[in-house]
Amino acid sequence: MDIASFAPVSTPTIIPVRDIIPWAVFGGVLCLLAIYFVSAEQGATSIFSGMYIHEFVHDGRHLLGAPCH
């Protein structure tokens, strides 16, 4: 004898694009800031004085192949 078991069907929630765009822009800006600090925050293009940010992301620079010396 077969016992039929039905799992509840879940319907996906539709998220409008106009609700996603602000978060996508925010995430893009954060990514651009991260790329700037890892790749270009040193020397003549530095925003902050000192070498604190350079030393903090130093290993990340070498991992991504960005020159820093």
Image (tube, grey):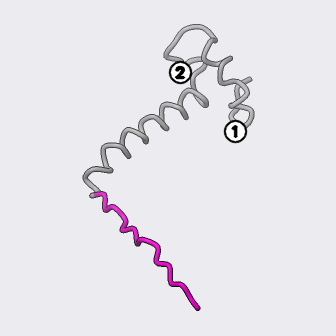
Residue 8 is one of the magenta-drawn residues? yes
Q: Position of residue 21 (x, y in %)?
A: 31, 49
What residue is disc 1 on?
A: 64
Residue sitting nearer the eye, 68 or 57: 57
Determine the main secondary structure of the stretch shown in magenta: loop
Q: Position of residue 10 (x, y in %)?
A: 39, 68
Residue reaching furthest bottom?
1
Q: Which residues are magenta?
A: 1-15
Residue sitting nearer the eye, 56 or 16: 16
Q: Is residue 20 above or below residue 64?
A: below
Please identify the quadrant where the C terminus is shown: top right
Q: Is residue 22 above or below residue 5?
A: above
Q: Is residue 24 above or below residue 61?
A: below
Q: What numbered label is drawn on residue 42?
A: none
Q: Is residue 9 left or right of residue 59?
A: left
Residue reaching furthest front?
1
Of the residues shown, which amino acid type is indicated by label 2?
A: Thr
Mark 1 / mark 2, whichever is N-terminal:
2
Q: Where is residue 39, by image quadrant?
A: top right
Please identify the quadrant where the N terminus is shown: bottom right
Q: Is residue 61 left or right of residue 6?
A: right
Residue 5 is one of the magenta-drawn residues? yes
In three-dimensional space, the C-alpha distance between marks 1 and 2, rounded to whole angstroms, equals 19 Å
Mark 1 crowd level (few <14, some 14–19, many ≥20, 10 Å Cα): few
Task: Please tell me whether mark 1 or mark 2 is closer to you in this view.
Answer: 1
Q: Where is residue 29, by image quadrant?
A: top left
Mark 2 crowd level (few <14, some 14–19, many ≥20, 10 Å Cα): few
Q: What numbered label is drawn on residue 45?
A: 2
Which residue sits at x=60%, y=20%?
42
Of the residues shown, which amino acid type is indicated by label 1?
A: Leu
